[in-house]
Each structure stands twice: as structure tokens, then as C-alpha cells.
Image: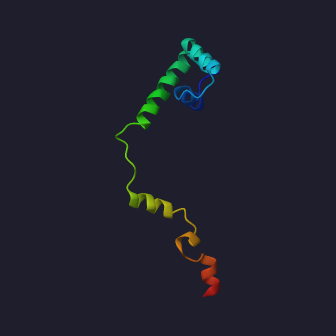
Amino acid sequence: MHLDLDMAFDLLEMRLEKALHEQWMNHMQFCVHCAEQMERFRTLRVSLTRAHLQNAPEFLLESAMKLFRTPAQVGQQSGIRQITVA
């Protein structure tokens, strides 16, 4: 049994029951592989929560969201309706 990403983040965010948390902590004392993985996940978590990360500008967010809108949401008729109406 080795540590995976989900379990590592559950450990880091203290979402596990006490017994399971202790079981994993004991396991990592003897399993070098899992201890190294946990350190990598800890580093990843810290890098993802750093203050220097910024949101994308509003105009880019709006542009990206338009890619996934249906024609009705954008206020246009679908291509099929345009062909049959014309």
C-alpha cells in the first residue's frame, strides 16, 4: 500500500479519521517511498497556495467562457435554424 494524491491531500488537510491518519503517519516512518511522495505533495500544495498566483484578467475569463456557451446563451440561433429559416 502506497500513498496516492487523494490520500496525501486528505492527510495534509486533516480530513481523515484519527485512526487512519495515525496509520498513514506510522507507515511513512518505515516507507521511504511514501515519505518522499508526501514531501512532494506537501511542496505542491504550498506552491499552489502561494500569494504570487493571480487570477486571469476578466476579459480573458469572459473569452474562455464564451468558448463553452451554446448559441442560445450567446443570443444567436443555431446553425441548423439559420439554414432552415433563410
> Relative to 61, does residue 81 appear above or below in the rendering?
below
Q: Quadrant of the N terminus?
A: top right
Q: Is residue 84 left or right of residue 40?
A: right
Q: At which x and y percent is residue 37?
A: 52, 24
Q: Is residue 14 above or below residue 64?
A: above
At horizontal 41% and vertical 34% (from top left) the residue drawn is 47
User: Residue lying furthest bottom in this view?
Assistant: 86
Q: Residue furthest left?
A: 52
How many discs mark residues in the rendered view? 0
**Rendering colour mode:** rainbow
Q: Residue at x 59, y 15 (%)?
A: 27
Q: Tell which residue pokes out farthest to the top in this image.
A: 30
Q: Answer above or below: position of 57 versus 69.
A: above
Would you place residue 68 above or below residue 83 in this image? above
Which image quadrant: the C terminus?
Answer: bottom right
Which residue corresponds to the image point at 61% horizontal and 26% vertical from the top-left? 16
Q: Nearer the viewer, residue 39 or 75?
A: 75
x, y percent for residue 40: 47, 27
Q: Which residue is depicted at the point 42% across and 32% down?
A: 46
Residue 67: x %, y % from top left: 51, 63
